[in-house]
Amino acid sequence: MRARRQLVFCFLAGLSLAGCIIQRPVNWPAVSNRRPETESVQALITESPASATINEEIDVPIIIYHHIKDDYNSNSEADKNYTVTVANFRAQLDYLVARGFTPILLSDIARYFAGDFKWPVKPIVITFDDGLISQYQNAWPMLKERGFKATFFIFTNPIGKNDNYFNWEQINELAEAGSEIGSHGHYHLFWDKITDQELRQEIIASKEIIEAKIGRPVIAAAYPFGQSNDQATQALKDAGYLVARDIVNGRSHQPAELFKLKAYFVTNDFSRFKTIVGD
Ligand SMILES: [Zn+2]
């Protein structure tokens, strides 16, 4: 029953068949045996050693988008859960501008707790999952127009092979403009259903591939299907990630929860959006 529900969820999310059903990919791209040292990764994100460690609960909404497109069928469960129309997305961004929100990156939360990031008055973390091409075609121009940055979680296998997803040129454009590219694995597998070795391949291969392509450290991850567990969290930490997003709802976060950051799926329901982000 659980597997069936996950498969349905997967299709609802609009993922490719290959990304959904492969539970035992034949191979992953070669990865290094290097175990990144957290200190060296930390050094990449901070010019100078953190002068202070912040130990307090923070309040920031983290929101999740999938498809941003005009093709929206209100009778479709998939669209109801995973699609925001272009007009509605524009209205949501305009709402954020009017209310004075400042979009920050998911990894800025880790920087803040390390004493290395100035917390804005009204922060929000805008995230996009799966590297879907409609995000580049429809959402990105509107984000850029408003000077907004976002965190894009991509899984690396379809990149450069499948036109339904970003290509590396587009990904580089996002990164160069100040947005963040995070890992969502390589094959978008259920991380709770694979062996520890496969789990580490997913986590390390995707990180190394993105880093090689964009020339920047990848320190943020999002659990595919929100399947977070202690084993996956440990693998992320071992690979040098500093922060990970879950899909449990909530907007208060503690330093100890950096690998279980709470978030909300955003839908085409504008009043629900306002409730999630607040005034
Ligand atoms: Zn996903």
Image (cartoon, rainbow, N blue to C red):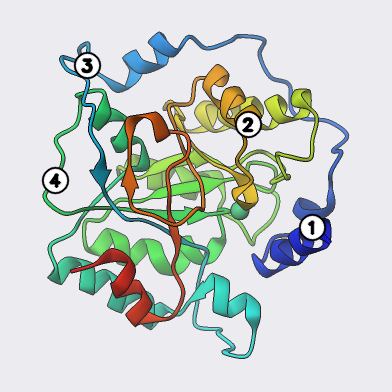
Residue type, label 1 = Arg
* Foreground disc of the pair 2, 1: 1
* Residue pointed to by mark 4: 120
Q: Could you tell me which residue is drawn at 41 percent across and 81 percent down?
A: 269
How far across and how far down the image is residue 83, in percent? 53, 74
Q: Could you tell me which residue is drawn at 57 percent across and 29 percent down?
A: 233
* Residue pointed to by mark 2: 232
Say few, some or many: other residues with alpha carbon within 10 Å of mark 1 (under 14 / 14 to 19 / 20 or more). few
Q: Is 219 in front, or is 63? A: 63
Between the residue at mark 2 and the residue at mark 1, the CA separation in whole angstroms equals 19 Å
Between the residue at mark 4 and the residue at mark 1, the CA separation in whole angstroms equals 41 Å
Q: Could you tell me which residue is drawn at 16 percent across and 54 percent down?
A: 122
Q: Answer with left or right where residue 37 lies relative to residue 50.
A: right
Q: Is residue 155 above or below residue 200?
A: below
Q: Is mark 2 within 8 Å of ligand 1?
A: no
* Residue pointed to by mark 1: 2
Residue type, label 4 = Pro
Q: Earlier in the sequence, mark 1 or mark 3?
A: 1
How far across and how far down the image is residue 59, in percent? 25, 48
Say few, some or many: other residues with alpha carbon within 10 Å of mark 3 (under 14 / 14 to 19 / 20 or more). few
Q: Earlier in the sequence, mark 2 or mark 1?
A: 1
* Residue pointed to by mark 3: 47
